[in-house]
Image (cartoon, rainbow, N blue to C red):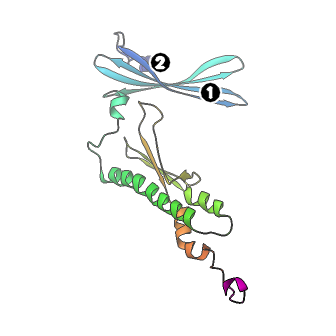
């Protein structure tokens, strides 16, 4: 297997070897490491994942994965509109519209005279669940039913070479508040005309 992996690597010296990411997972049985490298040669690129495991004082290589690349990961994962589909525009638009909708509900909640536990409603308005994530490079979706987002949207990129991830969620707190807002408003107090102060 090592001989087969070695065939991916040209004989000439690479122009650059860059560490793109590293992850460490500790458990009762030991520590697992995963390192991601990018090799740049004159006419090709290689992505290399190396899995290591440390247990009983020994560090062992448990896996090596090599992927030929047409270009650098920084280039292939850059945020670009070229060649994007309708779902890219839809997710981008939702990531802008949802926070604005939550902000509108939040301002309205703050200005609404709620007699009891108003601060809980303010927090609730900010929460959106579940979370839908979108890989901008691959166009892949995945749902996390237990993850919540503040303002119902998020944007993150683990590293300059990683794909942009856009996340949105259902603004359930804002929707429920707007639906129940009229019932939450404190009723106006009756003015007693028998009070001498009002004569």
Q: Regarding mark 2 in the picture, which secondary structure is present there? A: helix
Q: Is residue 128 visible?
A: no
Q: Residue at (51%, 61%) from the top-left corner?
A: 107
**In this view, 28 is above or below 101:** above
**Relative to 159, is 18 above or below?**
above
- Return the mark for residue 7: none
Disc nearest the viewer among 2 and 1:
1
Q: In terms of secondary structure, what is the magenta stretch mainly?
A: loop
Q: Residues within 10 Å of mark 1 (few under 14, many from 20)?
A: some
In the displayed structure, 151 sits above or below 3; it is: below
- Using the numbered discs, state the Cα–Cα distance from disc 2 to disc 1 in whole angstroms: 21 Å
Q: Look at mark 2 in the image and give the residue it sits on.
A: 2
Name the residue at 60% across, 74% down.
Answer: 185
The answer to which quarter of the image holds residue 73 is top left
Q: Is residue 3 above or below residue 120?
A: above
Residue at the far bottom in the pictured view: 194
Spot occupied by residue 187 in the image (x, y as percentages of width and height): 63, 78
Residue linked to disc 1? 32
Q: Is residue 49 left or right of residue 114?
A: left
Q: Is residue 197 magenta?
A: yes
Badge 2 density bin: few <14, some 14–19, many ≥20, Cα 10 Å: few
Relative placement, left or right, of 119 versus 85 is: right
**Residue in view at x 61 percent, y 19 percent:** 60
Depth check, front residue: 84 or 106: 106
Tell me residue 127's x, y (percent).
56, 56
* Total numbered labels placed on residues in the image: 2
- Nearer-N-terminus badge (2/1): 2
From which residue to which does the magenta span run? 192-199
Question: Where is residue 189 shown, x and y percent of the image?
Answer: 66, 80
Q: Is residue 88 visible?
A: yes
On the image, the x and y values in percent for residue 135 come to 41, 44
Element type at marker 1? strand
């Amino acid at each position: 297997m090592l001989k087969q992996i070695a065939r991916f690597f040209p004989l000439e010296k690479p122009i650059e070897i860059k560490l793109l990411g590293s992850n460490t997972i500790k458990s009762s049985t030991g520590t697992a490491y995963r390192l991601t490298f990018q090799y740049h040669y004159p006419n090709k690129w290689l992505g290399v994942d190396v899995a290591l495991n440390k247990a009983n004082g020994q560090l062992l290589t448990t896996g090596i994965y090599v992927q030929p690349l047409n270009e650098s990961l920084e280039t292939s994962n850059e945020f670009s509109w070229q060649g994007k589909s309708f779902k890219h525009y839809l997710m981008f638009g939702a990531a802008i519209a949802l926070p604005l909708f939550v902000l509108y509900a939040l301002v309205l909640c703050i200005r609404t005279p709620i007699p009891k536990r108003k601060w809980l409603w303010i927090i609730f308005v900010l929460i959106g669940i579940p979370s839908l994530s979108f890989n901008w490079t691959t166009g892949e979706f995945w749902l996390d039913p237990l993850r919540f987002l503040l303002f119902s949207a998020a944007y993150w990129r683990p590293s300059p070479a990683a794909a942009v991830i856009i996340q949105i969620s259902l603004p359930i707190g804002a929707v429920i508040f707007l639906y129940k807002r009229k019932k939450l408003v404190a009723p106006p107090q009756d003015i007693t005309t028998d009070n001498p102060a009002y004569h």
